[in-house]
Amino acid sequence: MTDKKNQVSRRQFLNYTLTGVGGFMGAAMVAPMVGFAIDPLLKGQKDTEFIYVMDVSEITNEPQRKTFKVDQVDGWYESQVDRTAWIFKTEEGNILALSPVCTHLGCTVDWASNEQYPNQFFCPCHNGRYTKTGVNIEGTPPTEPLHAYEYKVEDGKLLLGKAKKR
Amino acid sequence: MLHKLYDWIDERLDVTPIWRDIADHEVPEHVNPAHHFSAFVYCFGGLTFFVTVIQVLSGMFLTMYYVPDIVNAWESVKYLQTQVAHGQIVRGMHHWGASVVIVMIFLHTLRVFFQGAYKKPRELNWVVGVLLFFVMLGLGFTGYLLPWDNKAFFATQVGLEIAESVPYIGGDLKTLLAGDPEIVGAKTLARFFAIHVFFLPAALFALMGAHFIMIRRQGISGPL
């Protein structure tokens, strides 16, 4: 008991070991539960499925509203959900399938639904507007263009995947 | 760092006496297994509490995925057990813990009974302890139905018929429990879920509070 500096008292020793062992046991108990709770973050993205929507020959220069069904696995609940796309050919002749979800706050936009703006996508919630190719118009609430669906053409049929940021 | 933070708070709120009062009290020699190994029998109450904490925690997490609905209940349990990370462990903790907690309560009761620790002035604490035992049995009974598999369904049917055998009020009692005079179904499951996660835990916490306050007021009973 002479070298006081490096001495660990019995009380300190017991404190450290009990805290250590207790902490380890507590962590072993809580760790699986935390993993359980954050499981949605651990699950990766699923591969995109491409769904037949319409024949390429039917696509016009005027945007057409098309709905299609997508298989959705939501945990233990499997169902088919509706997706909507505005499909048309651009002036360059490319196919464009726009998502109707407003990039401002997620309302649904409509083509030429406002008489004042016959050649624009219009969102009724906060008067957001987009040009025909889905580019947001300066001075209206949306901050980025409408998302566009990934697409494939097979045997003259148009298949759509997920709507992605452009 | 932690010390400084603690001192900062303590200087303002004087929290030391609060935790001292809860945690800093001497364990009598006859209760300490370091002195007499046979004193391990005094651990069963604490172990009951420990397993109860595990039950509460794992149960809280299970409700993140479980739905009390006859169409989805079984599917959601299957999903959380097979698809969710550590699902089997978390459900396993709740499943096995439910049995372990009953065993621990039973051992704790045996110790108190055979040591005569329930005698004056501790009669009230014995009564509260018996109520705690019934609440725990109720939690076991209502929780058993929730996975909505065959075993759960038919066990509950038997349990409800036992309730029905009570003289005079049996029929009403069964209807009250099942939510329907004839069907064991959607209403029963929703009701059992509500009882299992809200009503009985509330009763459990209140009774545990009373149990612990009483033991602190009266102290552990003396050596034999």
Image (spheres, rainbow, N blue to C red):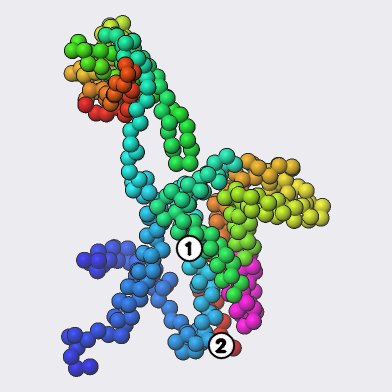
Where, quadrant-wise, is the C terminus of chain B in this rendering?
A: bottom right
Q: Height in image: B5 above or below A127? A: below
Nearest to N terminus: mark 1 or mark 2: 1
Query: Which residue is at the far bottom?
Result: A2
Q: Is residue B62 left or right of residue A87?
A: right
Q: Residues within 10 Å of mark 2 (few under 14, many from 20)?
A: few
Q: Position of residue B54 (x, y in %)?
A: 47, 62
Q: Position of residue B25 (x, y in %)?
A: 43, 78
Q: Is residue A124 left or right of residue B22?
A: left
Q: Position of residue A123 (x, y in %)?
A: 31, 17
Q: Residue at x 31, y 14 (%)?
A: A56
Name the chain letter of the residue that bears numbered label 1. Answer: B
Q: Residue at x 53, y 69 (%)?
A: B48
Which residue bears the numbered disc 2? B223
The disc placed on residue A121 is none
The disc placed on residue B53 is 1
Q: Amino acid at mark 1?
A: Val
Q: Amino acid at mark 2?
A: Pro
Q: Quick check: do tags 1 and 2 share a chain?
A: yes
Q: State the extent of the magenta-drawn residues as a range.
A: B108-132
